[in-house]
Image: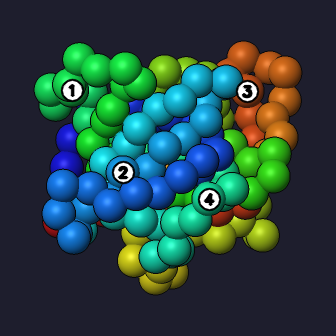
Amino acid sequence: MAYETFESVEGVIQSINRGDSCCTMMVSLVSNSNIVNVVVTGETMIVDNVRLRPGMRIAVFYDANLPTPAVYPPQYQAELVTSLRRNQQVKLDYFDDSLTSSDSTLRLNIGPATNVETLNGQQYTCSPENSELLVYYTTTTFSIPAQTTPQKVIVLCEY
C-alpha cells in the first residue's frame, strides 16, 4: 500500500451511523471545532481491532490521491484508523536509517519500553529503520527535528 500519499485527520467521534451498506459506517468526528465525516468499510484497517464508539479520540488516515466528494462537511474514505489516548500523538511516515521521518520533523529514540510490533500485533524482532512506521508518542524535544522516545511503533511491513 502506498502510505506516502496518506493524510490524516484527528478528532473525537461524535456519532456513528450505518453507511450505504451493512458493512460500512459513517463516522462523524469533531476535529478542531469542525465536523469531518469518515467512511469506514470492512476493508478499513483498525489498529488493535478496537470497537469505535462515540467520545473516542481517533486518528484516521485516508489516501489523498483518491477522489473525495465535494460536500460539506468533508468526507473521506478511511484506510487506517487508530484510537488515541490522552495527549497521545501519532505519525505515519517513512523513517530512514537514523529513524528520522521523511519530512525531517521527527526523530525516534527507540527505548527499552518502546513496543515495536507489526500491524497484526506481533512482535517485530528486526530493526525498524528504513520502514513505513506508525508511531505513537506523547512528548518531544524542542530541537529540529523534534526527538521522542515513542510508546509504540507499528512497522507497516510490505507484503
Contact (CB < 8 A) between labels 4 and 1?
Answer: no
Number of the label disc, if any, that sits on residue 146: 3
Position in image of residue 109 (x %, y %): 71, 48
Of labels 4 and 1, earlier in sequence is 4
Name the residue located 49 percent from the left edge and 43 percent from the top edge. 28
| Residue 44 horizontal side relative to residue 83, left or right | left
Closer mark to the observer between disc 1 and disc 3: 1
Asked whether the residues under the numbered discs 4 and 2 touch, taking CB atoms below 8 Å apart as contact, a structural biologist would say no
At mark 3, the secondary structure is: strand
Judge depth for marks 2 and 3 and give the one in front: 2
Question: Label 3 vs label 4: CA separation?
Answer: 32 Å
Q: Callout 4 environment at 10 Å: few (<14), some (14 to 19), or many (20+)?
A: few
Location of mark 4 (residue): 54
The mark found on residue 26 in the picture is 2
Q: Are marks 1 and 3 in contact (CB under 8 Å)?
A: no
Secondary structure under tag 4 reads loop
Amino acid on which disc 2 is placed: Met
**In this view of the protein, can residue 89 be seen by the observer?**
yes
Q: In the image, which disc is placed on residue 68?
A: 1
- The residue lying toward the viewer, choosing from 38 and 60, is 38
Q: Nearer the viewer, mark 3 or mark 4?
A: 4
The image quadrant that residue 70 belongs to is top left
